[in-house]
Image (tube, grey):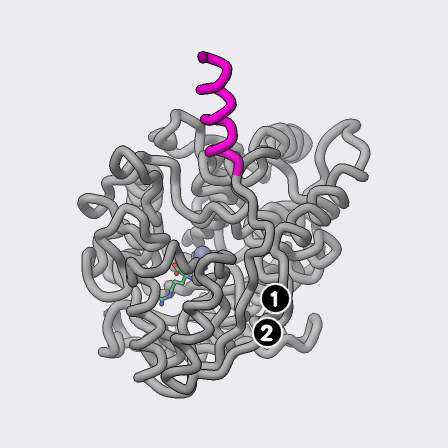
Amino acid sequence: MGYVLLFFLIGVAAADFTGHRLVSINARSREDLDFLNALGENPDFEGLDFWTDLSVYRPVEVRVSPNDYEKLQQTLKSVGISFDVINENIQDMIDEERRSMEKIPKVGLCNPQTTYCTYDEIGAWLSSMASSNPYRMQFTYLDGLSYEGREIYQVKIAGDMYNPKEAVWIEAGTHAREWIAISSALNLIEKLLSNSNEATEMLSKYDWYIVPVHNPDGYLYTHASSNNRLWRKNRQPCNMFYTGTDLNRNWEANFGGPGSSSSCFSETYRGTTAFSAPETAALRDAVLATPLVKAFFSVHCYSEYMLVPYGYTSAYPGRYDHLMDVANYMMMWLETIDERYYLTGTPPDILYEASGGAYDYFYTQDIPYSYTYELRPKSGTSNGFVLPASEIPLAADELFISLWAFSNITNLNWDMEPSHP
Ligand code: 0X9
Ligand code: ZN
């Protein structure tokens, strides 16, 4: 009997996306977006998993289970929204990714340039980087553990550890399945320590604080072989049946407002109160305790956007024009790497509102520059989150060069720079 129960529990825990399709939807109006937004909360569906933000500029991508597919097809046809199935079996793509990772010999340290390292491997790699660069890198943890009790890695890279400069904070991995964001943040650490001309300039202007795996429990869950490669939230129980808070809906930035959900089953479940997730509270405390924070960047994927505040309201912040100028300059440099044309703007302008996000919170806490990256791939391809590790170097170059551009264009004491907010 015990074995039967055990078998049942293991069976339930293993996520299998066989026959799940990735559907690319062409929304053309605000009405279409409202319609899709409501579908995400519609209990008639077993669960539609939106992989991209809602947008009229780029295809909206959603994972659909075999049971939901007919219904989705009919629903979209009935309202005249066109769509394409761009992947017929998401599990094949996940299996292929796993096989390609297993081919990499497990000797010595994991290399974040060539593969997606696990949480433990990242810890070992960071320790090794810190011991090879004792004067320029500090490897510590946020004060406060993840829900399941793991350390949240924190890195500081500075030209001079004893004479602080203005600080730039970078967070990646709030969403567990966004592996390319985590790898790009790890590569950023390596590049900042590389002695290149760009790195030297960046360290001469700012101190760099990086949290590469903000959601360690979720990230570990996406790596475990029988578990869920597509997990997004943290691993905090919500009720008897559902687990996980969306950390990017859990900040005190119009908490509870549009684009966040109060339902435990939702991928955008916001938590009971702002900062109910220990991971968000720990990052808040660390950033707010840092003197002279000039900028905060959230690194996500995917769709190739650079988002400017506010995400939760269509009202513009006072510094909107300046924030857009800086974002466009950064993207001009990013585009030199591989001609990827990132779209810049506020979510209400180019996507859809979302409340409780990290970058809005820090902007409202008087951090003058606050942005969210949505790295590659572009929607409309068939990879989504399951991007071959061979794309890590390009994604990392794009993140690095655009942050170099940021440090190049800011820190000039522009007389014209508008005041906050
Ligand atoms: O939904 C999110 O938190 C981010 N997108 S993701 O696909 N990486 O999950 C975007 C945050 C900003 N977007 C909006 N405010 N709409
Ligand atoms: Zn994300």
Residue at image mark 1: 377
- Furthest residue in direction front, as rendered: 1
Q: Where is residue 109 in the image (x, y as percent from the top left)?
A: 72, 31
Q: Residues within 10 Å of mark 1 (few under 14, many from 20)?
A: many
Q: Does the residue labelled 1 lie within 8 Å of ligand 1?
A: no
On screen, residue 292 above or below 117: below
Q: Position of residue 98 (x, y in %)?
A: 70, 43
Q: Which mark is residue 196?
A: none
Locate residue 76 relative to residue 399 in the image: left or right: left
Q: Position of residue 45 (x, y in %)?
A: 36, 59
Tell me what residue is drawn at x 69 percent, y 46 percent. 95
Question: Is 330 part of what is drawn in magenta?
Answer: no
Q: Residue 380 carries which label?
A: 2
Locate residue 319 relative to residue 174 in the image: left or right: left
The magenta segment: 1-14
**How many marks can you see?**
2
On screen, residue 163 above or below 370: above
Judged from the image, the quadrant occupied by ligand 1 is bottom left
